[in-house]
Image: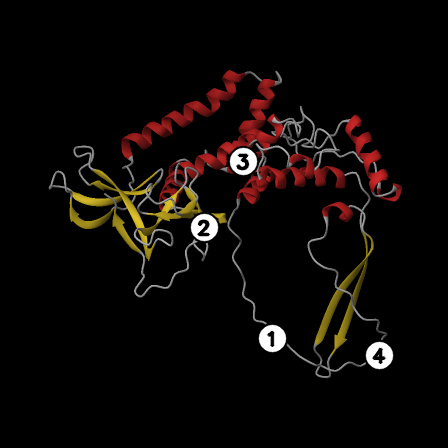
Amino acid sequence: MQLAQNLYEEGLITYHRTDSVNLSTKFLGAVKAYIEKTFGPEYSQYRTYATKSKLAQEAHEAIRPTDIRTQIPELRTQNNLTEQHFKLYDLIWKRAIASQMKEAIFDATTIQITSNNGYLFQAQGSVIKFDGYLKVTGRDQETIELPSVVVGDTINLVKSNPLQKFTQPPPRYSEASLIKALEEDGIGRPSTYAPTISTIVERGYVEKETREDGRKGRNFVPTELGILVNDFLVRHFPNVVDLRFTATMEEELDDIAEGKREWQPVVAEFYKPFVEKLNHVLEKVETIETPVVSTGQKCPECKAGDEIIKEGRFGKFLACSRFPECKYTKNLVEKLGIKCPDCKEGDVVVKKTRTGRIFYGCSRYPDCKYASWTKPKIDVPNSTPNPEVSS
């Protein structure tokens, strides 16, 4: 969202907090002229679109380039833009152009082969007869072209590759798939999607999965805190966390904004039973805390409490079990058990950016400025991860 904000502030794209599919007639005319001049009249298809969402905010145009003639080579002359800005602008530019081009035409072919022992095999392929909008967006996979055959032809098996597959669970949500799910359930608005995702990450309810190379992946994984909070809310406030509650409430608020309803009855209908339930939970339900992990050591300050590992906004840290009576805290650093590739003196440790992304740096920072997004691949005997306390 910040990248889009930067492009908007530079005047390169239209207002980006919208889910409108409408484009101005002036822009459509400019795109039509560009397509006919660049690719030929046969590629142009003047189109208008209608939204399928009842909750769509269409006060602004769809996200598009402000000037179709501005392309990536011109943007590279601007020092305040990064490669990530170029990729996002290129995506917006291509989608805007492709929306006004004709469909691609494929010649699809299916060949069915029956073996002597009764098994049926099938091969599918396609050939692009007219590339249409693919002229701009490109195609994700190469065309599979099948040989010319007729019914009754005999073929011999040259090689077989047995492949065993298992039923896979549904994939975890990424930022994109989570927003898509919210849209399908009628929850939220374009302006609330980014804050929603930021909130669940900053409060430690979810985190990005860690890949084998040590870098963060795209999908969210619920944390222990997130699971506890979710279970607590589902148990005691099932009506509030119900998907239909949020969607229905937003519809009612829209009606209030449009003057179709009075706000007092709508708020009262929700607030009175909610307050009663909240007071009951506060009085009767015990507080749930995350399980405490002890280091097996006594607090070095008060000598009475235990030294425990806690989770904070910027990662794990050490604290005293007697908090708030004892305010002892200390950073917890995870060492990889290998020496810094640059200075050869410090240890490579795991660090986090302010946005929660993991990177690897030297324990001697700022004396040594070594930093890497990828996990160093250095073979050291007995190099097992070793969490240690920083001074």
Local crowd size for mark 3, using a 10 Å CA cut-off: few (<14), some (14–19), many (≥20): some
Question: Which circle's residue, 1 or 4, is located before the other in the chain?
Answer: 4
Figure quadrant of the N terminus? top right
| Residue visible at 32% across and 30% down in the picture | 280
Distance between the alpha carbons at the discs numbered 4 and 3? 57 Å
Distance between the alpha carbons at the discs numbered 3 and 1? 46 Å
Q: In the visual, does 359 lie left or right of 26?
A: left
For residue 238, say whether it is visible.
Answer: no
Give the residue furthest to the right: 41
Distance between the alpha carbons at the discs numbered 1 and 2? 31 Å
User: The disc labelled 4 sits on which kind of residue?
Assistant: Gly
Figure quadrant of the C terminus? top left
- Percent position of residue 346, x then y: 30, 51
Question: Which circle's residue, 3 or 1, is located before the other in the chain?
Answer: 1
Judging by the rendered image, the residue that carries numbered circle 4 is: 152
Say whether marks 4 and 3 touch (CB < 8 Å): no
